[in-house]
């Protein structure tokens, strides 16, 4: 049986003939017409067939016949990305003007390329441009939600997942994961691996550095966490909060008191640590004051709700404590439902989405609630109660949308110390 290994000389001759034929085919006027559209189609076909080098040769022939237009730029970028040349791809995409119809797709691809090489800060900037140019760009919103999830940016994640729900592009599994970000303790093992690469690729990525430091701390790698934080200034309040938790882990009370005492009073993460520490020390007045500040910054933090209830009850005001305990119980009620939804039987239970919607609404998590009710309607279009809930929650959210969306981009709730 003839093969390339049995007949190396014959194979070499055939390869040489094929190479010459390919080169001749790429010379304008030789064997193929000097038609730009022909070369564009050829480059596209070769790329789709998994031959990026051949596609590159074809697109170079195209470049000899006409100046590149935005469609050519996008194709060139896709070919360069397939050939593992990200800088070349990004250069082509940057030449597509914002006022061209291809601009949203170009910014999306640029964001994906940056994310692929772990430059999440640059990726976010490109993806935000994509959704600014085309608010209904589903894939751009999905890419943003991935970044915010890895970086533990809960408020921004909430905004993106809610947007996907409103675009009818949020799956059942993604909605379950949304619930887990609030009701399940973060296991940072996998994210730490990703974030380590992100910080190595972009040392100035503050958001990723903070998430990496907190993830390492939770993995009992306090020295590594402290090393990651060393690049951030002492005055950075988010870094200060993690440093205080590291000192608390080590039992270094003087360092904890210094870090907390020198930080801003109204920072939610610092106020939470101050309040919970004051509660353990029996200073209920300081505990109540600080935990109220933490609650104002993040009203859905279950541990703050429980601690504030404990502080108020210990201070002799059980009536004031009860609403916070009740709110904590409402969040707790979601945990078994989310666990059930994570199982195969739960994912096939037609009644479960409406139950989750009701539980989220009761807990004040209106974005999630509306998303769950929309899933319920998709499963049963005749479910009038779910339909009414979608409408009711839409009005409630719209009534405070300006405030909601402003806070979603400004407030960093995080999950530090949960």
Image (cartoon, rainbow, N blue to C red):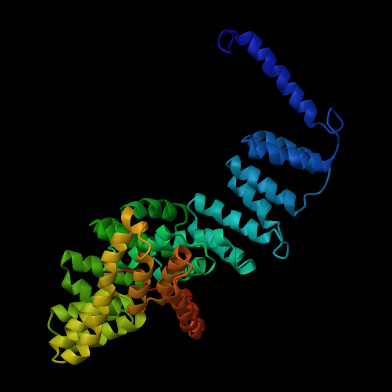
Res 315 → quadrant? bottom left
Res 79 → quadrant? top right
Left or right relative to 226: residue 60: right
Whether residue 186 appears in this view of the structure is no
Image location of residue 296, percent across then percent down:
34, 84
Left or right relative to 159: residue 300: left
Image location of residue 255, percent across then percent down:
21, 72
Quadrant location, the C terminus: bottom left
Towards the viewer: 386 or 160: 386
Image location of residue 288, percent across then percent down:
22, 86
Left or right relative to 302: residue 282: left
Whether residue 170 appears in this view of the structure is yes
Identify the residue at horizontal 49%, vertical 58% (top origin).
120
Whether residue 342 is situated above or below residue 304 in the rendered picture = above
Identify the residue at horizontal 86%, vertical 37% (top origin).
34
Towards the viewer: 119 or 413: 413
Image location of residue 171, percent across then percent down:
45, 59
Towards the viewer: 147 or 258: 147
Identify the residue at horizontal 74%, vertical 54% (top origin).
70
User: What is the count of numbered marks?
Assistant: 0
Identify the residue at horizontal 73%, vertical 62% (top origin).
100
Quadrant location, the N terminus: top right
């Amino acid at each position: 049986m003839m093969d390339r290994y049995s007949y190396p000389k014959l194979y070499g001759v055939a390869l040489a003939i094929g190479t010459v034929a390919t080169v001749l085919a790429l010379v304008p006027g030789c064997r193929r017409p000097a038609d730009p559209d022909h070369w564009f189609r050829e480059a596209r076909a070769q790329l789709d067939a998994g031959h990026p080098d051949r596609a590159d040769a074809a697109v170079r022939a195209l470049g000899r016949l006409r100046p590149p237009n935005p469609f050519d730029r996008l194709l060139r970028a896709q070919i360069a990305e397939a050939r593992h040349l990200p800088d070349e791809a990004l250069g082509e995409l940057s030449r597509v003007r914002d006022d061209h119809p291809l601009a949203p797709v170009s910014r999306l691809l640029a964001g994906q390329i940056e994310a692929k090489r772990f430059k999440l800060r640059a990726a976010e900037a490109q993806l935000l441009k994509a959704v600014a140019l085309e608010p209904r760009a589903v894939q751009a919103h999905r890419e943003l939600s991935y970044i915010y999830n890895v970086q533990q940016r809960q408020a921004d994640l909430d905004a993106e997942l809610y947007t996907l729900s409103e675009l009818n592009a949020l799956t059942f599994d993604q909605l379950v994961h949304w619930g887990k970000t609030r009701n399940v303790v973060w296991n940072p093992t996998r994210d730490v691996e990703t974030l380590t690469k992100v910080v190595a690729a972009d040392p100035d990525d503050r958001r990723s550095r903070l998430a990496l430091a907190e993830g390492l701390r939770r993995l009992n790698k306090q020295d590594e966490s402290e090393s990651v934080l060393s690049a951030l200034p002492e005055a950075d309040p988010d870094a200060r909060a993690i440093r205080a938790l590291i000192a608390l882990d080590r039992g270094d009370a003087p360092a904890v008191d210094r870090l907390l005492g020198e930080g801003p009073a109204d920072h939610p993460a610092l106020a939470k640590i101050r309040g919970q520490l004051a509660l353990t020390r029996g200073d209920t007045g300081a505990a109540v004051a600080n935990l109220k500040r933490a609650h104002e910054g993040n009203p859905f933090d279950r541990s703050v709700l429980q601690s504030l209830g404990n502080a108020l009850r210990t201070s002799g005001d059980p009536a004031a404590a009860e609403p916070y305990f009740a709110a904590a119980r409402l969040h707790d009620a979601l945990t078994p439902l989310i666990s059930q939804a994570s199982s195969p039987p739960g994912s096939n239970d037609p009644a479960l989405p409406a139950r989750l919607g009701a539980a989220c609404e009761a807990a004040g998590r209106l974005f999630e609630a509306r998303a769950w009710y929309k899933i319920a309607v998709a499963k049963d279009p005749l479910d009038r109660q779910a339909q009414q809930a979608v409408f009711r929650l839409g009005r409630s959210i719209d009534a405070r949308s300006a405030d909601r969306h402003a806070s979603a981009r400004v407030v960093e709730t995080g999950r530090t110390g949960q």
